[in-house]
Image: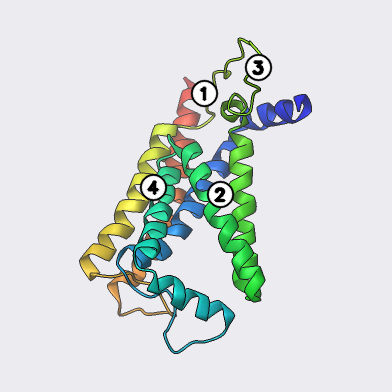
Amino acid sequence: MAVVAKLIARMRAARWCNLCVVNLRFLIGFAFVPAALKKVLGQPFTDPTNHGPFHDFLHGFYATGGFYTFVGVMQLIAAVLLCTQRYATVGALVALPIISAITVFCWSTGVVFTSVIATLMALGTIGLLAWDWPKLRLVLARDDRTTDARVEPITPRIDMRLWERCGAAIITLYLGTALVRGGVYRPRGMEWSEPAFYVMPAVLLLPIATFLVDRRRVRRARSS
């Protein structure tokens, strides 16, 4: 474990690793949002005319009502927490059991493409928790040992407040679009005439713009 801790500490000292982590949080968190809103709004996740083990399970899942909504709420909570950056550790802890269950379900029903995506999300979430090992190690410490172990202070190599605002902008933009439309928008091709279609590119551009601003601030700080 000492080797792993040193490796994580070395990665935390690298600016590019910090940038990868904040954007991985955005990616996993935002991936939860459309599916979460479907459940929260009480909309079926799949077309009622589709059948097979995968779709039949989802039909039954939708029919549960309250449980269907509850899962959506938890997915939305995980997404928001991940995108805040400040509470991303809690978000990853909430997201892991959800994405793990989805991954096992997808592989069990033979939907390969969705299974691969879910597996990558699960591995990414595990990676996020590994990144936060300095915080989590006390949770896993033995209760019968009286130690004065404390979490080492972490100095981010990026402007975390800036990235927190980016996460808030991503969530606000997508939820605002869903609110205006009165439902979830999921593009089915190049729908140039649909205003909501341009929300997805805007969401992708927000981290890029944040990165450029962050890099400019770092350069100014170094030059001064």
User: Gap between marks 4 and 1, in whole Å?
Assistant: 32 Å
Could you say whether the residue bearing mark 2 is in a helix, strand or loop?
helix
Q: What is the x, y in percent for residue 154? A: 54, 23
Circle nearer the N terminus (2, 1): 2
Q: Residues within 10 Å of mark 2 (few under 14, many from 20)?
A: many
Circle nearer the N terminus (3, 2): 2
The image shows residue 50, relative to residue 194, as above or below, that is below
Q: Which mark is residue 144?
A: 3
Q: Quadrant of residue 60?
A: bottom left
Q: Which mark is residue 96?
A: 2
Q: Which residue is disc 4 drawn over?
A: 80
Could you say whether the residue bearing mark 4 is in a helix, strand or loop?
helix
Q: Amino acid at mark 3?
A: Asp
Circle nearer the N terminus (3, 4): 4
Is mark 3 in CB contact (under 8 Å) with mark 4? Answer: no
82 horizontally vs 18: left or right: left
Circle nearer the N terminus (4, 1): 4
Q: Quadrant of residue 45?
A: bottom left
Q: Which residue is disc 1 drawn over?
A: 222
Q: What is the x, y in percent for residue 79? A: 43, 51
